Image: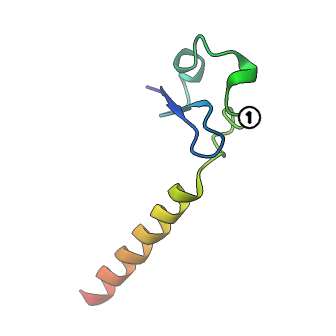
């Protein structure tokens, strides 16, 4: 199920979840008021990318110590 959230880049409403319920998650939000990348889900904040990179590095370090 998808839910409404706020884009970390443009701070406009967008969605998170499976992608099958986008319109119901954004019901009541005009198209022009939504994150410009809401249909692709590509508008990710740099913070999200940094967290992913740190998680991958930590996993590699952990596995190399085992």
Res 59 → quadrant: bottom left
What color scheme is it? rainbow
Q: Residue furthest bottom?
A: 65
Secondary structure beneath disc 1? loop
Q: Which residue is mark 1?
A: 36
Residue 34, horizontal then vertical, whole percent = 67, 26
Above-or-below relation of 21 to 65: above
Q: Is residue 39 above or below residue 66?
A: above
Density class for disc 1 (Cα within 10 Å; few <14, some 14-19, many ≥20) is: some
Numbered-mark total? 1
Q: Nearer the viewer, residue 13 or 24?
A: 13
Q: Position of residue 31 (x, y in %)?
A: 73, 19
The outermost residue toward the front is 11
Residue occupying the point 60% across, 49% down:
44
Residue 56 lies left or right of residue 31; in this view the side is left
Q: Position of residue 11 (x, y in %)?
A: 60, 37
In the image shown, does 66 or 43 lie closer to the viewer? 43
- Residue 52 placement, left or right of 23: left
How far from the left and from the top, in percent, is residue 4?
A: 50, 26
Classify the position of the C terminus by image quarter: bottom left
Residue at 63%, 46% in the rendered image: 9
Q: Residue furthest left?
A: 66
Relative height, residue 46 to residue 4 (above, below) = below
Q: Is 43 positioned to the left or the right of 20 in the image?
A: right
Q: Residue at x 47, y 27 (%)?
A: 2
View extreme (top): residue: 28
Residue at left offset 51%, top offset 65%: 50
Q: Pick the quarter of the image with the N terminus.
A: top left
């Amino acid at each position: 199920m998808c839910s409404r959230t706020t884009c970390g880049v443009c701070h406009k409403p967008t969605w998170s979840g499976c992608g099958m319920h986008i319109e119901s998650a954004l019901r009541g939000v005009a198209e022009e008021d939504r994150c410009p990348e809401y249909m692709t889900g590509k508008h990710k904040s740099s913070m999200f990318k940094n967290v992913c990179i740190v998680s991958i590095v930590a996993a590699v370090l952990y596995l190399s110590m085992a």
